[in-house]
């Protein structure tokens, strides 16, 4: 499943980031890398998650490229 499909409050581990190096770099700067656990805060408008005690918002297009597995 992809990040944007999580419900509010659900937790998941990032298992893959699809697409190119540039997207991986942008997400890495926000703390979204493979192996990290995220918690969905909001999926209305930009997808907002908590990772490492930080709140991060990404666009829906980016969220569709982040593959996660529920915890």
Image: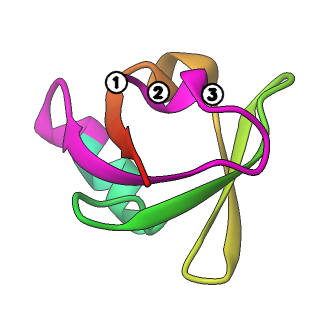
- Judge left or right: residue 60 versus residue 66: right
Could you tell me which residue is drawn at 53 percent across and 60 percent down? 38
Check disc 2: other Cα within 10 Å, few if <14, some if 14-19, many if 20+.
many
Callout count: 3
Residue 36, horizontal then vertical, whole percent: 35, 67
Circle 1 residue? 65
Q: Are marks 2 and 1 in contact (CB under 8 Å)?
A: yes
Identify the residue at image location x=19%, y=27%: 18
Q: Which residue is mark 3?
A: 59
Give the colour scheme shown. Answer: rainbow
Image-based side of 14 in relation to 8, left or right: left
Quick check: 20 above or below 12?
Answer: above
Q: Which disc, if any, is residue 56?
A: none
Q: Quadrant of the C terminus?
A: bottom left
- The quadrant in which residue 64 appears is top left
Report the side of 34 relative to 20 (left or right). right
Rendering coords of residue 53 (x, y %): 66, 83
Q: Earlier in the sequence, mark 3 or mark 1?
A: 3
Please name whichever residue, 39 or 53, is drawn nearer the observer in this view of the structure: 39
Separation of disc 3 and disc 1 at Cα? 10 Å
Q: Does the stretch in magenta take in 14?
A: yes
Answer above or below: position of 54 versus 38: below
Q: Which residues are magenta?
A: 1-23
Q: Secondary structure at mark 1?
A: loop
What is the secondary structure assignment of the residue under circle 2? Answer: helix
Neighbour class for label 1 at 10 Å: few (<14), some, many (≥20)? some
Q: In the displayed structure, would residue 59 be above or below residue 33?
A: above
Image location (x, y in percent) of residue 40:
69, 48
Callout 3–callout 2 Cβ contact below 8 Å: yes
Residues at circles 3 and 1 in contact by the CB criterion of under 8 Å:
no
Magenta stretch holds residue 37: no
Residue on which disc 2 sits? 62
């Amino acid at each position: 499943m992809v990040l944007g499909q999580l419900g509010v409050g659900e937790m998941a581990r990032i298992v893959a980031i699809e697409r190119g190096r540039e997207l991986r770099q942008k997400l890495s700067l926000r703390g979204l890398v493979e192996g990290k656990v995220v918690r969905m805060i909001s999926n209305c408008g930009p997808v907002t998650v908590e990772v490492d005690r930080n709140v991060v918002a990404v666009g829906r297009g980016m969220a569709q490229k982040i593959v996660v597995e529920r915890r």
